[in-house]
Amino acid sequence: MDKYMYRYISVRILYSSNRFQRQNGSTIIEAIVAMFVLSFGVLALMLAQITAVHTSVNAANQGEVTRAVQNYIELMNSQPKISLEVTEDAAKNKIFTLKKDFSDFNNKNCSTLLNINLTNAKVNSCVITDGQITVTWWGQILNKDDDNNDDNNLKDKNLFSYSLTAGQS
């Protein structure tokens, strides 16, 4: 320390007790207010974390449904019924085209066929019609065995859907 800094510190200490009333620590009111502010901040962080986990679980479920549907579409594309369709143009020329028929795969409840494993959610419907698979599922719920997770309680606000047609990718 140089000599000026030493003089400032010594003067400050020398005169501070006469001119200023110093408070060491805080009052009980300040401590209580600080605790409440801190607790509300922690609560806000906890709520943000819960929302982030909720969003990531729904994203994982969407990935699971997409994987299952695309795998089954590959199976459908590899085993279609193929028929020969004959049409005529204006000059009475015959036009032969191959038509893929996926009617053998039609199913009104295909969730077991697709082997969809969702986290904290249930499949609402899974339908295969004419080569198109449509899956709808509820968003994340707290109790997977809860039967109250129906249209009346959620009003379709928490419903996700994915659809893919054979021949598309």
Image (spheres, rainbow, N blue to C red):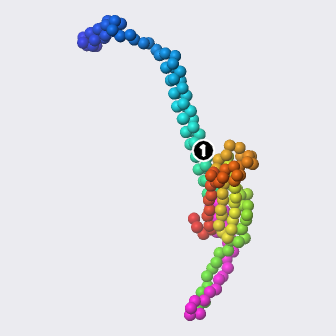
**Is residue 8 in view?**
yes
In this picture, residue 153 sits left or right of residue 25: right
**Picture coordinates of residue 78 (x, y %)?**
65, 69
Q: Amino acid at mark 1?
A: His
Q: Does 101 appear above or below 13?
A: below
Number of numbered discs overlaid on the protein picture: 1
**Residue closest to the eye, 151 or 67:** 151
Q: Which residues are magenta?
A: 69-92
Residue at 61 percent across and 53 percent down: it is: 62
Q: Which residue is mark 1?
A: 54
Where residue 46 sits, quadrant-wise, is: top right
Where residue 54 sits, quadrant-wise, is: top right
Residue at 74 percent across and 46 percent down: it is: 145
How busy is the neighbourhood of tag 1: few (under 14 within 10 Å), some, or many (20 plus)?
A: some
Residue at 67 percent across and 74 percent down: it is: 101
Q: Does 76 appear above or below 56?
A: below
**Picture coordinates of residue 14 (x, y %)?**
32, 6
**Picture coordinates of residue 43 (x, y %)?**
56, 33
Q: Does 163 appear above or below 101?
A: above
| Magenta stretch encompasses residue 70 | yes
**Picture coordinates of residue 75 (x, y %)?**
66, 65
Q: Check disc 1 and report its element: helix, strand or loop.
A: helix
Q: Quadrant of the N terminus?
A: top left
